Image: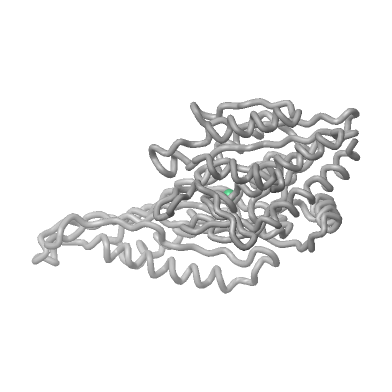
Amino acid sequence: MDSCIALLRDLVAINSVNPTLVPGAPGERAVAEFIAADMRTHGLDVSIEPVVPDRPNVVGVLEGRAPGRTLMFCGHTDTVGVAGMTDPFAPVERDGRLYARGAQDMKGGVAAMMSAAAEIAARGGLAKGRLIVAAVVDEEHSSIGADALVTKWRADAAIVTEPTDLAIAVGHKGFAWVRVDVEGKAAHGSRPAEGQDAILRLGRVLARLEALDATLQAQPPHALMGTGSLHASLIEGGHELSSYPDHATLQMERRTLPGEPESKALAEVQQILDALAREDPTFRGTATARFSRPAYEVPANHELPRALTAALARAGGQPRIAGASFWTDAAVLGHAGIPSILFGPGGAGLHSTVEYVNVRDVLTCRDALIELAKNYCGSIG
Ligand SMILES: [Zn+2]
């Protein structure tokens, strides 16, 4: 078996479910220790950097023999939960696929980047420049790992090895979470003159949000990322059957495009609430921004996509430029001044109960990363 696939099997066998997503889950410590030991074995200079207790980033550095440019490979070590899966941490290989939780998202990419660095070291190391391999925590929740990474580490460019089906993804959408609270007036269910139904009033908001979503999705699409969109994620309200509900709450998500500020979602919702209050002075609703992350796009004409295109072609792949719909740590790196693109193996089932990565893609990803480092930092050996 290729050592890269053996490494992938070891990585998925370690439970690293994000403990913020799933309370009581073990988190990234064990997998971080494993990664640190493996990178040390291959001669990288390794540091374990706690982000919060028991949840460390791991950074390995391969220093070239002469000064040059710094390239970073970055991947996250946490996974989503495993509810409904049978044997999520027992890797099974079948028909060229490796099945396990995290196989595609994104231990396949982590194995590829670690294995690329190990291979470069084994072939005599970098003649010039510096390669940084960063395995970070918590991408599946709020990316505290990537946030911590960019306070300490700099690079001229980065590849985030999230699963892209081997497409070179030069950007992705952002997201914003907004909470909407609508007030009503509690009353006995038989006394409509006294009550104000907060749930039905929230319905007015929902109808406007649906119309806004349709408008967003009817906009001319971004060439690689499509359109913005929104959805109602969570809803809550009411106390009992025979009473008018005095309060209803909606939590919603807006997906944003490059160029749309994080504050846009809140402004859109506020506009809807203002309009409803003008139409009915008894309508009372407030909107609150909860959490957001910006969209990201590598600067136009940055050399990184071209360099990776050439590297992937040399590794036997078929390069194509794309955008990703999901948010990633590339935005954290990019907005911290490290131009970043996404490039990782294909597969299916990320965040679902049957997840796999294409074994061949993991190897192609690794080979392209080796070619890229060789040319971006300086030749090997
Ligand atoms: Zn991921």
Count of numbered tags? 0
Q: Give the percent coordinates (x, y) of residue 84.
A: 40, 55
Q: Is residue 7 left or right of residue 209?
A: right
Reply above or below: 19 against 101: above
User: Can you name the residue that lies furthest to the front here?
Assistant: 1
Q: Nearer the viewer, residue 282 or 6?
A: 6
Image quadrant occupied by the C terminus: top right
Residue drawn where x is 86% and y is 39% of the image: 377
Can you see residue 301?
A: no
Residue drawn where x is 70% and y is 43% of the image: 3
Q: Nearer the viewer, residue 161 or 203?
A: 161
Q: Give the percent coordinates (x, y) of residue 223.
A: 70, 67
Reply above or below: 147 against 194: above
Can you see residue 18?
A: yes
Residue drawn where x is 44% and y is 50% of the image: 82
Q: Quadrant of residue 375?
A: top right
Q: Is residue 361 left or right of residue 287?
A: right
Q: Is residue 154 left or right of residue 244?
A: right
Q: Nearer the viewer, residue 229 or 51?
A: 51
Q: Give the percent coordinates (x, y) of residue 11.
A: 59, 41
Q: Is residue 192 left or right of residue 16?
A: left
Q: Give the percent coordinates (x, y) of residue 194.
A: 13, 61
